[in-house]
Image (cartoon, rainbow, N blue to C red):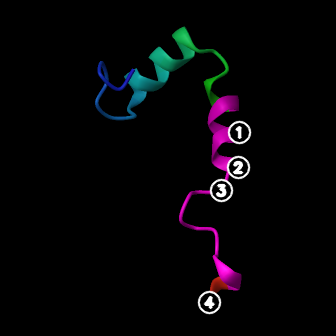
Amino acid sequence: MTLIEKTHNDRFVARMEQFMTQWRFYRDQLNRLPVIGSIPVNGGL
């Protein structure tokens, strides 16, 4: 989708809703995962 719409504008959202109706669910699931590099190593030392 990013190749068609370069930004997450209204057209991007409309296309996501058209082609992947549960995209918000998937986005929320992905956003719950930790980001690599943000997990403290050795207790944050």
Q: Amino acid at mark 3?
A: Pro
- Name the residue: 38% across, 32% down: 9
User: Is residue 36 on the magenta stretch?
Assistant: yes
Where's the N terminus, which quadrant? top left
Q: Earlier in the sequence, mark 4 or mark 2?
A: 2
Residue located farthest toward the top when viewing the structure as drawn? 18
Circle 3/circle 2 CB separation < 8 Å: no
Q: Determine which residue is flagged by label 4.
A: 45
Q: Determine which residue is flagged by label 2.
A: 32
- Name the residue: 58% across, 57% down: 35
Query: Which of the two discs, 4 and 2, sits closer to the camera?
Result: 4
Q: Amino acid at mark 2?
A: Arg
Category of crowding for the residue at label 2, using alpha-carbon neighbours closer than 10 angstroms: few (below 14), some (14–19), many (at least 20): few
Q: Marks 3/4: CA distance?
A: 19 Å
Q: Determine which residue is flagged by label 3.
A: 34
The percent position of residue 5, horizontal first and vertical second, equals 31, 24
Q: Marks 3/2: CA distance?
A: 7 Å
Which stretch appears magenta? 25-43
Query: Which of the two discs, 3 and 1, sits closer to the camera?
Result: 3
Location of residue 44 with respect to 29 vertically, above or below? below
Category of crowding for the residue at label 4, using alpha-carbon neighbours closer than 10 angstroms: few (below 14), some (14–19), many (at least 20): few
Category of crowding for the residue at label 1, using alpha-carbon neighbours closer than 10 angstroms: few (below 14), some (14–19), many (at least 20): few
Circle 1/circle 2 CB separation < 8 Å: yes
| 17 to the left or right of 24 | left
